Image: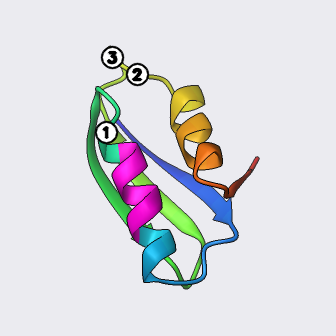
Amino acid sequence: MQTTIDVSGMTCAHCEKAVKDALEALNGVTGVEVHLNTGKVDVTYDDAQITIAPMRAAIEEQGYDVVV
């Protein structure tokens, strides 16, 4: 499955890496692509292993806001 998550507060390469690393550390996430210019994060994942809620939590734990 794939989803796009809107994230506010990302402004630099460090932000991109922090979000990417946090998501890639989750079981079931198989791909992450962060788009700083649009604030969107494309996540490929196995929906049998993970839902969107822990992905949002992982992003928010890095200090960014998920736009719902």
Q: Which mark is residue 62?
A: none
Q: Is residue 28 above or below residue 18?
A: above
Q: Residues within 10 Å of mark 3 (few under 14, many from 20)?
A: few
At numbered mark 2, what does the secondary structure look like: helix, strand or loop?
loop
Q: Residues within 10 Å of mark 2 (few under 14, many from 20)?
A: some
- Marked residue nearer the N-terminal end (1 or 2): 1
- The kind of residue on which mark 1 rests is Ala
Asked where in the image residue 67 lies, by quadrant, the reply is bottom right
Is the residue under label 2 in contact with that under label 1 (CB below 8 Å)?
no
Locate residue 52, reporting x and y percent: 54, 31
Is the residue under label 2 in contact with that under label 3 (CB below 8 Å)?
yes
Task: Say whether residue 16 is left or right of residue 26.
Answer: right
Name the residue that disc number 3 marks. Answer: 49
Q: Residue furthest top?
A: 48
Q: Which mark is residue 50?
A: 2
Locate residue 30, reporting x and y percent: 23, 41
Question: Measuring 40% from the left and 45% from the top, which residue is drawn there?
Answer: 23
Q: Main secondary structure of the magenta part?
A: helix
Asked where in the image residue 29 lies, by quadrant, the reply is top left
Question: Measuring 30% from the left and 45% from the top, which residue is drawn there?
Answer: 24
Name the residue that disc number 1 marks. Answer: 25
Q: Which residues are magenta?
A: 17-23
- The kind of residue on which mark 2 rests is Ile
Please tell me whether mark 1 or mark 3 is closer to you in this view: 1
- Marked residue nearer the N-terminal end (1 or 3): 1
Q: Is residue 63 above or below residue 53?
A: below
Q: What whole-number distance in Å separates the C-alpha atoms at marks 3 and 2?
A: 4 Å
Is the residue under label 3 in contact with that under label 1 (CB below 8 Å)?
no
Task: Say whether residue 54 is left or right of residue 23.
Answer: right
Query: So how many labels did they put on this image?
Result: 3
Task: Say whether residue 23 is left or right of residue 62.
Answer: left
